[in-house]
Image (tube, helix red, strand yellow):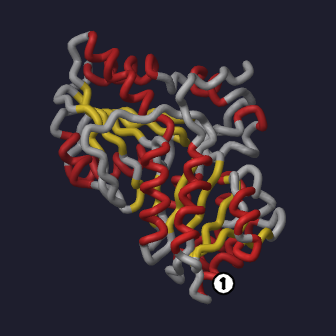
Amino acid sequence: MSAAAPAPAGWHDCRDTFSKTVEALAEADPRIVTVVSDSVGSSKLVNFRKRWPERMVNVGIAEQTVVAVGAGLANGGKIPFISAAACFLTARAMEQIKADIAYTNVNVKLIGQSSGIAYGELGPTHHSIEDMAWLRLLNNLTLIVPSDPWETEQAIRAAAALDGPVFVRVSRMPVPDLPRSNPRFEIGKAETLRDGDDLAIIANGVMVHRALTAAEALAADGVAARVINMSTVNPLDEATILDAAKTGAVVTVEEHSVRGGLGGAVAEVLATHDPVPMRILGFPGFLPTGSADWLLEHFHLNAAGIADAARQLLARK
């Protein structure tokens, strides 16, 4: 275990983007309100509270209640953004998310803050590496895992514009701006960030820039790896996955359990329509306590580990 290394200059905490975007949306639409579970500071909504104290509901540490209150506000015509730690918002309030929001298809936006292993040193109780598996099974619930500040802003704006329940996973782990030649965000559409025909790497969230670095290392070996940012997990862009299968090998990378998340979703599509050799990179189960950076290194979820997995998979083509 080791302390987290300082973020490189120019990297970003996407919670800042979330809070600024929600403020911008609230200026234009009085229906937008926030609901928090004693999570004003960790959600970076202090300024929102100063500007619109009457438009924020703080229920205290009570995740089931925060979801139920959000559903009630939506039924009253508001557009609530519920912001809470992803580990507690999902694990403690799944019944309310299922029954009060997804089943009833109400217009609520759930923001899972500090998702994945961002709370590394606080241990498995604070890790949120099962949330994608739980949430992607719920009908009506759109699930988005943005990868950088630009995509976080697009996801929040798209969530506000969509008439229905949305869950956005926002990490506190710093990330760089991703290179985009033609930036365009659409719910349910994947983004190809790098072309290649030897294999495809499909990632989302904080793993996308690591996948791009791995592709650069593979290029030095003469391997052309396609890198796909699959930020929307539900609904899933099956057409892009099936096109990726034409490379003959697919690696998925996620800051999540290897069971039931992005890799599981991609595997379901491939097994049904076009099976190809595949590797699912993620966490094996409950994790030890350590910084987020240390955990990624320990479980080979860094660029070197992704590249090594890709090389091993290529031998199976």
Task: Specify whether 97 is left or right of 40.
Answer: left
Q: Residue at x 60, y 36 (%)?
A: 173
Q: Residue at x 23, y 49 (%)?
A: 240
Q: Nearer the viewer, residue 33 or 166?
A: 33
Q: Residue at x 18, y 33 (%)?
A: 247
Q: How many marks?
A: 1
Q: Residue at x 51, y 26 (%)?
A: 301
Vertical position of residue 234 compared to residue 311: above or below:
below
Identify the residue under disc 1.
Answer: 72
Task: Specify whether 98 is left or right of 250.
Answer: right
Query: Which amino acid does the dot numbered 1 rest on?
Result: Gly
Q: Position of residue 30 (x, y in %)?
A: 58, 78
Q: Nearer the viewer, residue 157 or 251?
A: 157
Residue 139 visible in the displayed image: no
| Residue farthest toward the top in the current orientation of the protein | 221
| Residue farthest toward the bottom in the current orientation of the protein | 76
Q: Position of residue 257 (x, y in %)?
A: 55, 42
Residue 83 visible in the displayed image: yes
Q: Position of residue 239 (x, y in %)?
A: 21, 53
Tell me which corner region of the image, top left, top right, bottom left or bottom right, holds residue 295.
Answer: top right
| Residue farthest toward the right in the current orientation of the protein | 60
Vertical position of residue 133 compared to residue 202: above or below:
below
Quarter of the image with the N terminus in it: top right
Q: Nearer the viewer, residue 146 or 286?
A: 146
Q: Residues within 10 Å of mark 1 (few under 14, many from 20)?
A: some
Q: Secondary structure at mark 1?
A: helix
Quarter of the image with the C terminus in it: top left
Task: Specify whether 65 is left or right of 101.
Answer: right
